Image (cartoon, helix red, strand yellow):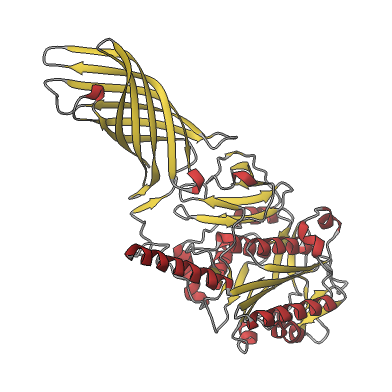
Amino acid sequence: MKRLGVLLGVAALLAARDASAEALVRRALVIAHNGSDDPSLPSLRFADDDGVLWAETLQRLGVETTLLVDPDEATRASQRPVLAGARPPTPDEVRREVARLRAASLADDELGRETDVLVIYVGHGNTDEAGRAYFTLAGGRLDKASLYADVVDPLGADYVHLIVDACRASGVVGSRGGAAEAAVLAELRGMLAREQLATRPTVGALFAESEDGETHEWSRIRAGVFSHVARSGLLGAADINGDGLVEYSELGAFVSASLQGVKGLPARLSIHAFAPTRSPRRALVGPAPAGPSLTLTTGFGHSRVSVEDADGRRLADVRRSEEQYVLLRLPEREEYWVRTPTTETRVTLAELGGGGPGMTPRELQERGPAEEALRRGLFAVPLDKDFYDQYVATSGLVPVDLSRAFPPTPGGPRPFHLGPPTSGPAWEVGVLGHAAPLGLDGLSTGLSLSWRGAELESLPLYYGARAAYSLMPVSFQGIRLHRVTVQGLLGTRGVAGTPLFAEVGVGWGLLGVAARDARMGDPTLWTTHAAAGVEGRLLGLRMRLAATLAGDRVTLDGDDRWDRMFGFELAFRR
């Protein structure tokens, strides 16, 4: 009965958790427009692409999303599924969608569900003749009054989150923003700044700007820099405590860290994040439903990682610290390219769940100075605990709970942490123990030296070699046994995204017998090796702990048979 009570309690907790997850509904309105009603401002190149990627990102994160966009020819040719239901970003369509979202929110309220609505705008920001700021729509404008009175306030949602990349563009690395006069910048900033949100405690905002009011779009990623960084954060790169939720402090810190290293542009980019004052830790997204995900474990071996699809669209970027575990949720594609500054690999949808991918060298290409500034500086700074703490202290945002993500001592390494040490080649030195050979009582102990290579390009397998020596430290009836083996290895690591590994080996062995007055041995043994265990870090050292099974082909009393020996091995490397 006691066990039944425990099971019922667990079931009740799980049901409560599921009910809580279902009690919050997230919806999104994505508005993206390349054009401008100001003849002096050229059309944007990638606002429509940003709109498509924003819609795909939010749908992947379980957010019911409506896309208002007028795609150019190149974007239409991509034939992304989200474009099938897209409508033009006109004032009428905006009002129509706001009315639909309001009706849905009221219906959810009747059912006892909370609703959050994300409003994403990507397009031109400008000011009219009277100096009033506005965002450009197709055939209309969205100024400060209409943004709040016609969009935000009528939504009827419990919380509204505004993410704005308002901009203008020119050239390969184009600038996004309004005119650079101080009065114009103040007006644009005021549309989304803290003072505007003070009377709306359930509304939060996130946007970027620079000293001259411009953000940027980059042809290499076919997107606005701020939009791309923010999407990467929401997809999991900003989730510093690993709870599956992305809060304002996390996203703001991630975007700030990612932009901090960019130098060589006319002005430095900065991030503004204002959480809803009624609930400063209100998450923008999460937890995400099941779907394509790339796991970057603590020992992946690469800190700066980008993910593109087969058409070259950049889906996400992250700069990780060495001990950081990152789970990136990715919009669904048949295949992905995972790249670092020096390596790359192609990963199919079916292969995503196999842990950190094996990487192969890639060619580097130098580019123009402005684009090179972004290539080198963007995502140059990792979002680690120190940066996060500094950001929260200066931004005034409420921090997330880091008690489970970091050690109690600030900045101190965790004494033990699981995770594959690396996917690249490495030498290891180990200590081992196994049952004495030939069925004798006792334990043989010794040392091993192993080399394990990188994973094969087409299979999640690695190859390697292992040499080992063991000795019975205590003689048995005056006899001591020496055993030497040299074997080739084949194994797999990061099984199903876990720190587990397994391997087998086969090779040559020597078994020596030392008695009081005699020495003899058999140098022609066939020997096998099998091991399975866990990988991780201990006091800064990479380690693997394995249960082993060895087998030698021996001849005893005229009979050939396999001599099996169970044991263990603990191997280290720096």
Q: Position of residue 73 (x, y in %)?
A: 86, 57
The answer to whether any part of residue 210 appears in the image is no
**Residue at image location 54% in from the left, 72% down from the top:** 19
Q: Position of residue 548 (x, y in %)?
A: 34, 34
**Residue at image location 78% in from the left, 80% down from the top:** 142
Q: Nearer the viewer, residue 218 or 101?
A: 101
Tell me the quadrant of the picture where the C terminus can be found. Answer: top left
Does residue 531 sit above or below 395 in this rendering?
above
In terms of image quadrants, where is residue 378? bottom right
Tell me the quadrant of the picture where the N terminus can be found. Answer: bottom left
Q: Residue furthest top?
A: 558
Q: Position of residue 34 (x, y in %)?
A: 81, 66
**Residue at image location 47% in from the left, 61% down from the top:** 384
Q: Position of residue 324 (x, y in %)?
A: 47, 55
The answer to whether any part of residue 354 appears in the image is yes
Does residue 62 sit above or below 162 in this rendering?
above
Is 444 left, or right, of 257 in this rendering? left
Q: Nearer the viewer, residue 269 or 16?
A: 16
Does residue 378 sit above or below 125 in this rendering?
above
In terms of image quadrants, where is residue 130? bottom right
Q: Nearer the viewer, residue 364 or 503?
A: 503
